[in-house]
Amino acid sequence: MESKKKTALKTVIIIIAAAAAICLLVFFSRSDEYTDSFIAMDTYCSVKLSGKDAEEAAKEFKEITEKLDSETLSRFEKGSLVYSLNENSEENIPESLAKYFDTLFDVYRQSEGAYDFTLGAVSDLWAIGTDNERVPGSDEIKAATGLCGADKLIYDGSSMTVPGGMKLDLGSAGKGIALDEIKAKSDSLNLKKCVVSLGGSVLVCGKGNFKVGIQKPGAAGYIAVINTDGAFISTSGSYERYFEKDGVRYHHILDPDTGYPAESGIVSATIIAQSGTLSDALSTACFVLGAEKGAELCLEYGCEGVFVSADNKIYATPGAAEMLEITDSSYSLEVIR
Amino acid sequence: MKNKIIRRGDIILALAAVAAALILLIFQRTSSGGRVAVVTVNSEVIARINLDELSEKTVIKTDTEPSAIIVAENGEIYFESSGCKDKICVKTGRLTHKGDTAVCLPARAVVSISGSDVDAITY
C-alpha cells in the first residue's frame, strides 16, 4: 500500500513539474507581436505591431485608412471631398488636410511640375488596370494635359475650387497621407514597434532598428535592404501596373509634361523621408525626373533616394547609400554625388 | 531515508522534464523552420502549404469573382492565372523566399510565405 501511494505521489509531482515546464515554455515563447492585413485604398495593407495597445492600434489604423479614403481622398467614391471637388464645387479644406495640400503644392513647384496631383483627366484616358485601358490618340492626350496643372487650382488655404475639366487624383499621395495620420495616432498609443505597409508605402517606427526591403522590379523578393531606426519609405515603380500593346509596355506613372508614361531611365524610385506625404509625392516626382535630378530634389527636402535602373544599377544619394545593403548580387550600387 | 517520498531519481526525472521543455523552447526560437505558404481569401486562411515538403503539384482555385488559380509545385507558389484585368498577381511571379507576397485585389486573394528577414518590403 505504502509503495503504491508513493508511486502515485511521484507521478503527480512529475506531472506537475512537466506542466510547470510547459507553462514556462508557453509563457516565454509567446510574442506580443500583433499582425493583421486588410484591403483599403484599393491596395493590400499590412500591420505588424508590438506593445500593449497593438491590437487596438491595428484596428484604429485600418479605420483611419478606410475613412480617409471614403470621406476625403477617393475620386471614385461619391461623397468624398475629392469627388465633390472634381464635380467643380467649391469645398472647404479642413486644417487637418490643408497641411498635406501645402506639401503637395510645394513638391509640385519644387519639381517644376514633375509631380502633379491634378492628372486625373490624363489617367482617365489611359485607364490603366481597367477594362478600358488603351493608348489614347496624341490629340486627346494634348487636350487632357492642357486641363492639368496644380497651379490652375483656385485655393486660398481654406477653400478650393477645381476648374472645369480638371480632375484631382491623389492616388500618388493618399497612402502617404494615411501613413502620416497613422503615425500621429501611434504616438498617442502604447506601442513598442510599429510597421505599417499600405500597398508598399511603409512606416516603421518605435524601439530598435528596422529593415525594409526594396522590391525586385518585376519579381517577388527584394534586391536591397534599407536599415533605419524609423522612417517613411515609399516606392514608385513601373513594373507593377502596366499593359502591353503591339509589343510596347505602357506603365501607370505619367509624365505631366507629355501625358505619356514617364521614361527617365529608371524602373523604380524609393524615397526615405520623415513624412509619408513627402515620401509618396517625392517617389512619383523622382520617378518622372530620373536618378540625377531626383537625387537633387531629395536633397532639397533633406530626404534620401534609391533609384533602380533597368540594367540592374542601384543609384543612391550618399545618405541612402549608408543605410543600404545590397542583397541581390546581380545589382550594383552607385552613389550619386 | 528509506521512507522519503521523493527520491533523487524523481527530482532528476522532473528536472529532465523541465530541461526537455527548455530545449524545445530554444529549438523553436532558433530553428528557421520550413517555408510555409499561407493562402488567404477575404482575410480568411484557406490553405497552408509547406513548400519544403511539397511532394505533388497543388492547385487552388479561389471561389471568388473573378477567380484566381494558385499553384504550388517544386518548392514554389504562384498565381498561375486570374480573371482580373491587371494581372498584377500573375506578374509578381513565383514566390520562393520567406516574406514573398503576391496579391490579387479583385479576387481578394493573398499568397504569402510566412516569416521574413525584413520588417517590410517597399514597392
Image: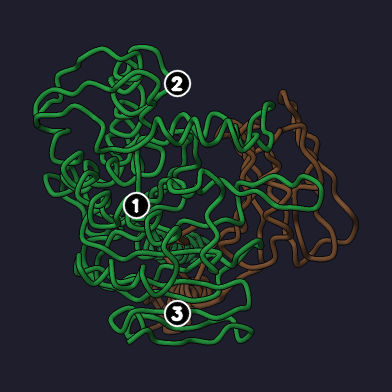
Q: Which residue is mark 3?
A: A315
Label 3 Cα crowd, 10 Å radius (few <14 / some 14-19 / many 20+): many
**Same chain letter for marks 1 and 3:** yes
**Total tally of numbered discs in the picture:** 3
Q: Chain of mark 2?
A: A
**Which kind of residue does numbered mark 1 sit on?**
Asp
Q: Colour of chain B?
A: brown
Query: Residue at 25% of width from left, 68% of height from top?
Result: A303
In-front residue for pair B2/A93: A93
On the question of residue B14 being in view, the answer is no
In-front residue for pair B48/A240: A240
Query: Residue at 15% of width from left, 29% of height from top?
Result: A155
Q: Position of residue B66 (x, y in %)?
A: 73, 27
Mark 2 element type: loop
Q: Position of residue B88 (x, y in %)?
A: 66, 46
Q: Position of residue B20 (x, y in %)?
A: 51, 75
Mark 3 element type: strand
Query: Residue at 39% of width from left, 44% of height from top?
Result: A172
The answer to whether the residue labelled 2 contacts the one labelled 3, judged by CB atoms less than 8 Å apart, is: no
On the question of residue B29 being in view, the answer is yes
Q: Is residue A233 above or below residue A249?
A: below
Q: Which residue is mark 2?
A: A76
**Label 2 to label 3, Cα distance in Å?**
36 Å
Q: Which residue is mark 1?
A: A280
**Mark 1 / mark 3, whichever is N-terminal:** 1
Label 2 Cα crowd, 10 Å radius (few <14 / some 14-19 / many 20+): some
**Mark 1 / mark 2, whichever is N-terminal:** 2
Mark 1 element type: helix
